[in-house]
């Protein structure tokens, strides 16, 4: 069975679900959104760390509706599993062939943290 992914977003003022076409890419997982990954025998709901509460709250209902209306005759008992950005299970990651654990790392945040550490080291040296 083919794997499908859909994006749950309220970026335009109303909740919308749109299928993401093409091959699965980790870069399709946007921090400001929720994605539903339908693997037929299970459904993952991935929550981006900046997703709205409305997106998170509605995603399970959308996933259940997918199961109920799927013309392939899905069981409503199909497991729905929740994943959070930067805490993804190995099972979830296997659906993205090029998974990179550093994909969601903000390079500006890394530089800021390095600058703070360097400042702390400099302050320690002047005290001694």
Image (spheres, helix red, strand yellow):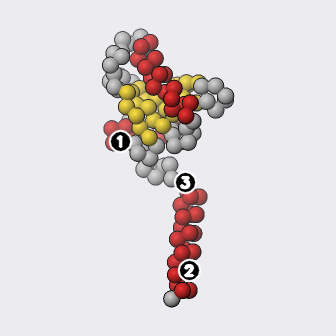
Q: Quadrant of the N terminus?
A: top left
Residue shown at the point (59%, 58%) measured from the top left:
108
Is 12 situated left or right of 26 in this image?
A: right
The answer to whether marks 2 and 3 mark residues whose Cβ atoms lie closer than 8 Å is no
Which residue was labeled with disc 1? 89
Q: Is residue 106 shown to the viewer in this render?
A: yes
Picture coordinates of residue 46, whole percent (x, y): 45, 35
Which residue was labeled with disc 3? 106
Q: Is residue 14 above or below residue 115?
A: above
Q: CA distance from mark 1 to mark 2?
A: 40 Å
Which residue was labeled with disc 2? 123
Q: Nearer the viewer, residue 53 or 48?
A: 53
Badge 3 density bin: few <14, some 14–19, many ≥20, Cα 10 Å: few
Counting residues from the start of the chain, the first of labels 1 and 2 encountered is: 1
Is 60 situated left or right of 16 in this image?
A: left
Task: Please tell me whether mark 1 sits on a helix, a strand or a loop.
Answer: loop
Q: CA distance from mark 2 to mark 3?
A: 26 Å
Residue shown at the point (67%, 28%) measured from the top left:
13
Picture coordinates of residue 25, whole percent (x, y): 47, 38
Q: Is residue 97 shown to the viewer in this render?
A: no
The nearer-to-camera label among 2 and 3 is: 2
Q: Nearer the viewer, residue 96 or 57?
A: 57
């Amino acid at each position: 069975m083919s794997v499908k992914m859909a994006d749950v977003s309220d970026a335009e003022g109303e909740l919308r679900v749109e299928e993401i076409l093409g091959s699965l890419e980790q870069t399709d997982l946007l921090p400001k959104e929720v994605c539903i990954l339908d693997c037929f025998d299970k459904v993952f709901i991935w929550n981006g760390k900046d997703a709205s509460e409305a997106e998170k709250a509605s995603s399970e209902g959308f996933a259940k509706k997918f199961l109920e209306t799927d013309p392939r005759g899905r069981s409503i008992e199909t497991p729905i599993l929740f994943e959070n950005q930067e805490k993804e299970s190995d099972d979830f990651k296997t659906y993205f062939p090029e998974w990179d654990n550093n994909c969601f790392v903000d390079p500006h945040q890394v530089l800021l943290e390095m600058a703070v550490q360097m400042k702390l080291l400099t302050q320690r040296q002047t005290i001694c």
